[in-house]
Image (cartoon, rainbow, N blue to C red):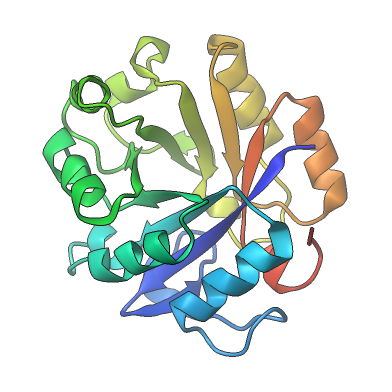
Amino acid sequence: MPEIVPVIDLMHGNVVHARRGDRQAYQPLRSQLVDGCEPLAVADALLAATGARHAYIADLDAIRGHGTHDTLIARLVRRHPGVEWWVDGGFADADAAASLHRLTGATPVLGSESLRERDALARLADAGIGALLSLDHRAGEPLGERWIFEPPHWPARVIAMELARVGSEAGPALDLVECLRAQRADVDFIAAGGVRNAADLAALDASGVRAVLVASALHDGALAR
């Protein structure tokens, strides 16, 4: 089965519940795993529930240009040193992503909706930073520059992100995953958006997915270790 990668969406210092990529409407997290939305407590609960080796953070303030959570992210990295933390901070170029890595120790995720520098991934790799690429989609439409979606630009780990399904309980975008895998079978694809239960994990496993980003199905108790 794919590895479950718990997701933490940060906004204004708290964890929020992401739904369909409508960031302006996100509300503070309500979870069966933990009381409240304080990030350290939420992270502790998610990692205890999943035993995850990787965790994903969306710094929504950074993505929207409203500051960053770098200090908090650095605390999470120090608190859970056995976890590789993947962070999407709305990076437009390699310098911004490298700064996040230098300040926090986290691995940057370059989202296609924000990325503007063609050589960013190559520059990060030359610096010894194995960044991930998130190929962002909304209702099947790619978000970002066209060249980002050309397979030669993809690194070893790619997130197949369908924002319209995030928090939607609509099921994963299997067609998106299969389309991307058909273009680069050598890439490790990470599915994101819509996972509800173990049946969805099994379907993604059959599609060759190695890992999946999950939030809602963990907080509502549908998935656990």
Query: Is 62 drawn above or below residue 96 in the view shown?
Result: below
Horizontal and vertical percent for residue 199? Answer: 87, 46
- Residue 145 point in image, percent of width and height: 27, 29
Instruction: Let me know if residue 219 appears in the view.
Output: yes
- What residue sits 52% from the left and 53% below the top? 55
> Residue 211 at what x, y percent from top left?
64, 38
User: How many numbered dots are placed on residues in this image?
Assistant: 0
Q: Quadrant of residue 192?
A: top right
Does residue 95 lie above or below 46 as drawn? above
Quadrant into which the N terminus falls = top right
The answer to whether residue 121 is above or below residue 38 is above
Which residue corresponds to the image point at 24% horizontal and 19% vertical from the top-left? 122
Residue 119 picture quarter? top left
Depth check: 180 or 103 in front? 103
Q: Is residue 38 left or right of residue 65?
A: right
**Residue shown at 54% from the left, 11% from the top:** 183
Name the quarter where the C terminus is drawn. Answer: bottom right
Task: Spot the residue most to the bottom.
Answer: 35
In this view of the protein, can residue 91 be seen by the observer? no
Relative horizontal placement of residue 208, taking residue 47 as reference (left or right): right
Left or right of residue 157: residue 221: right
Residue found at x 53% / y 80% = 41
- Give residue 214's position: percent from left, percent from top: 63, 55
Left-right relation of 109 to 92: right
Q: Closer to the camera, 52 or 140?
A: 52
> Which of 196 and 32 lies nearest the eye of the viewer?
32
